[in-house]
Amino acid sequence: MNDRTTPSPSRRRRLKILSYNVHSCIGTDRRLDPARIAEVIAAAEPDIIGLQELDVGRVRTGGVDQAHAIASLLQMEYHFHAALSVAEERYGDAILTALPATTIKGAGLPSIGEQRGAVWVEIALGDHRLQVFNTHLGLRGRERIRQINTLLGPSWLGNSACHNRPVILMGDFNAIPSTATYKAAARRLADVQVGSGAKPKATFPSRYPLLRIDHIFVSQEVKPVETQVISAPLARRASDHLPLLTTVEI
């Protein structure tokens, strides 16, 4: 009888990560509906969510705090950074999760014209500390290069808190894979649409997707398992972007 046993591999935690530009919760049918955005997200059952283009207290969208409204419907906490603030009106990006999380930083990025920003949250996963970054980059190429270089620099992903730790960078980069912005990110991190085996798919515009500008990048400590662009009928109406969903192991 052979009573030797093979040691089990170290346990890895599986998580679903979703990035979604919600277009101020205004759909392709011009309907304003944060609850519809929450419904699209809920169907995917993500653990961590990065949302871009959220309105908070803006007259144009009825004064609703969209980050709070969506988080409440999903029974999650939210970590919001306002890239733009005018009086009581704010516009920006948020990370949502029900996992134990702490906001590390929310700040603007070097911008030309419309101000852009990012938010950084640390999520506790047992012995691991997952560093999650969510951003929305600008429309001009030289602007995006400055922004991605800032994000990859010592104040953000280059910070010692990210060294040899699991890192996720997601958002609307306004950059297809042939651009210098995308290539800068891909040199440091892995694109989950490339790393999980399936053919990469476009996310914009939602009705007839042609451009792959929404991305989730991960460090080597994070293993992509499966990735999809959610293209259900409701998702095609809810925003002008489609959500990008990935399952990873950490």
Image (spheres, grey):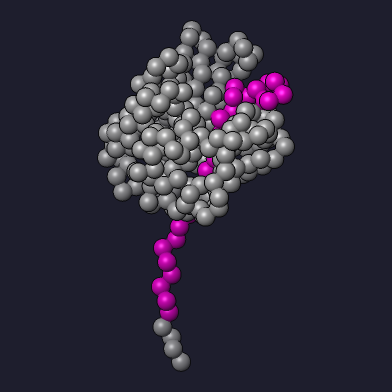
Q: Residue at x 67, y 25 (%)?
A: 27
Image quadrant assignment for residue 191: top left
Image quadrant assignment for residue 33: top right
Q: Main secondary structure of the magenta part?
A: loop
Image quadrant assignment for residue 105: top left
Q: Residue at x 51, y 18 (%)?
A: 91
Is residue 33 in view? Answer: no
Q: Residue at x 38, y 23 (%)?
A: 143
194 is higher (above) or lower (below) than 62:
below
Is residue 135 in view? Answer: yes
Please state the horizontal and vertical placement of residue 125, each as a whole percent of the image: 44, 48
- Furthest toward the top, the residue is 87
Residue range in magenta is: 5-32
Please state the horizontal and vertical placement of residue 37, each as a whole percent of the image: 65, 31
Please state the horizontal and vertical placement of residue 49, each as a whole percent of the image: 53, 37
Is residue 12 shown in magenta?
yes
Please state the horizontal and vertical placement of residue 150, each as a whole percent of the image: 32, 29
- Furthest toward the bottom, the residue is 1
Q: Residue at x 62, y 36 (%)?
A: 209
Q: Is residue 245 left or right of residue 110?
A: right
**Of the pair 238 and 64, the residue shown nearer to us:** 238
**Of the pair 132 and 127, the residue shown nearer to us:** 132
**Of the pair 147 and 33, the residue shown nearer to us:** 147
Q: How many marks?
A: 0
- Furthest toward the front, the residue is 178
